[in-house]
Image: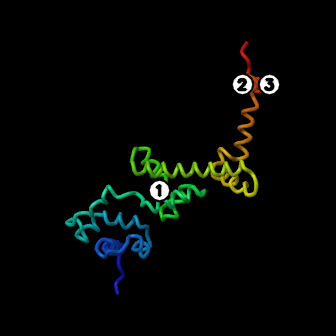
Amino acid sequence: MARRTPFEAQVDAVRRVRFGGEVALSVAASVGVNARQIYRWERDPDVRRALALDDVPPPPPPPTDTPLIGDTDLKRLVDAVRDGMAPHRALRIIGRHPSTWKIWQERAGRGVEDCKRIVDMVTRADAEMERSCVVSIRKGGLGWQGPAWLLERRMPEVYSADAAAEAAAIDDFSPAELLEVIEAAGLLERAL
């Protein structure tokens, strides 16, 4: 039996996806490449000629009215964020890659309505989680340490001990007192 060349393996992989109805992810796994590579091979002119794909029109793009995420998955995502998960980590629950969160944020910034709606809902859920933790901490009692830990890990720029010390240091000095401290340290010479 003759060994297949790498080009023949590429053509076979594209044939399996394009005409065999196999999923690109499973074909890529069997060939030992990333699924994106299958699509790159499909655009290769030599592979297209070998499969006579130039005569076949490309598959139609997905309809634009298809939602980015189903209502059930959106609810699961929002609930996970409300329970304390970071949005990019919560996407794993619904089978999405964490980078999807950044993509949705960028598209929302450009005005894509579906993305704006998703980002708004997730951001609100994150704010609700923060509020719930703060309320639990303020009430004290048993179990307030868990929400405190969560806030400190999720938002260290606001809730960490360093942030609290920095805020206290800023509150301790008036601008005139701060100027005196800087002058006393020799960092600023007063103009005569």
Disc 2 from disc 3: Cα separation: 14 Å
> Going by the image, does 44 lie left or right of 73?
left
Q: Position of residue 139 (x, y in %)?
A: 72, 50
Rendered-image quadrant of the N terminus: bottom left
**Local secondary structure at mark 1:** helix
Q: Quadrant of residue 79?
A: bottom right
Choose mark 2 or mark 3, whichever is in front.
2
Question: Badge 2: few (under 14), some or many (20 or more) residues near its Cα, within 10 Å?
Answer: few
Q: Residue at x 46, y 52 (%)?
A: 118
Residue at the left extreme of this rendering: 55
Residue type, mark 1 in image: Thr
> Going by the image, does 136 lie left or right of 77?
right
> Going by the image, does 181 lie left or right of 35?
right
**Local secondary structure at mark 3:** helix
**Residue nearer the viewer, 122 or 139:** 139
Q: Which residue is mark 3?
A: 184
Question: Which tag, 1 or 2, sits closer to the chain's start?
Answer: 1
Residue type, mark 3 in image: Ala
Question: Which tag, 3 or 1, sits closer to the chain's start?
Answer: 1
